[in-house]
Amino acid sequence: MAALAQATFPVFLLLLLSAAIAFVDGSSGEKFTHVHFYFHETRSGPNTTVANYKNLTSTPSFAYIGVFDNYLREGTDPSSTLLGRAQGVGVFAMPDGRSGLLTATEFVFTAGKYNGSTLTMMGMYAAAGEVDRSIIGGSGRFRMARGYSLSKVISIDDLRLVAKFDLYVKHY
């Protein structure tokens, strides 16, 4: 019996080592995808895609919540190919005169190679410079997604906001 245990122990170690190598080298089925699109928000007019609820506290200038259902497009032109929607909320607070806007966004892809899939992003938004936020989940093609998003406002005025998004995602 002891001889059998001694003979099978090296085989067990070899199997354990093979499983560890497969996990470390990425052959576990994990993929990496770069997703690029433009975020289009209509800020006023009959087709507004964002709504703000103000006066959440006794101090009206302290905070507000914004809800949005914006377009994801292939380009900066509002008539470029529609790829999906960006649906979510933004919570704005200004306790000490400094502003912060926490966003929770679900990117819902309705066309192209990601049709039927979603990515979930969360993090702080800033109107100036490049913004880095976390990808914390996904569905469909992006099941168990994690990664990061880099975005930058391309143009902004009273009517429209357009931002460029690059998402770097690991998923199964």
Image: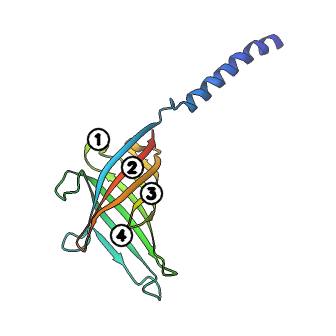
Residue 1 visible in the displayed image: no
**Marks 2 and 3, Cα distance to the nearest angstrom?**
10 Å
Residue picked out by circle 4 = 67
**Marks 1 and 3, Cα distance to the nearest angstrom?**
24 Å
Classify 168 as above or below 26: below
Residue picked out by circle 1 = 113
First reached walking from the N terminus: tag 2 or tag 3: 3
Of residues 151 and 9, the one drawn nearer to the viewer in this rendering: 151
Task: Using a 10 Å C-alpha cutoff, classify the residue at mark 3 as few (fewer than 14 neighbours), some (14 to 19) or many (20 or more).
Answer: some
**Marks 2 and 1, Cα distance to the nearest angstrom?**
15 Å
First reached walking from the N terminus: tag 3 or tag 4: 4
Mark 1 element type:
helix
Please name the residue shown 19% across and 57% down the image: 77
Please name the residue shown 33% across and 59% down the image: 86
Among all residues in the image, which is located at the extreme bottom?
58
Residue picked out by circle 3 = 132
Kindly indicate whether the residue at mark 1 contacts the one at mark 2 (C-beta within 8 angstroms).
no
Q: Is residue 99 left or right of residue 74?
A: right
Please name the residue shown 40% across and 51% down the image: 119
First reached walking from the N terminus: tag 2 or tag 1: 1
First reached walking from the N terminus: tag 2 or tag 4: 4
| Disc 2 versus disc 3: nearer the observer | 3
Mark 4 element type:
strand
Q: Position of residue 70 (x, y in %)?
A: 29, 62
Q: Is residue 154 left or right of residue 31?
A: left
Give, as a three-letter code, the residue at label 1. Answer: Lys
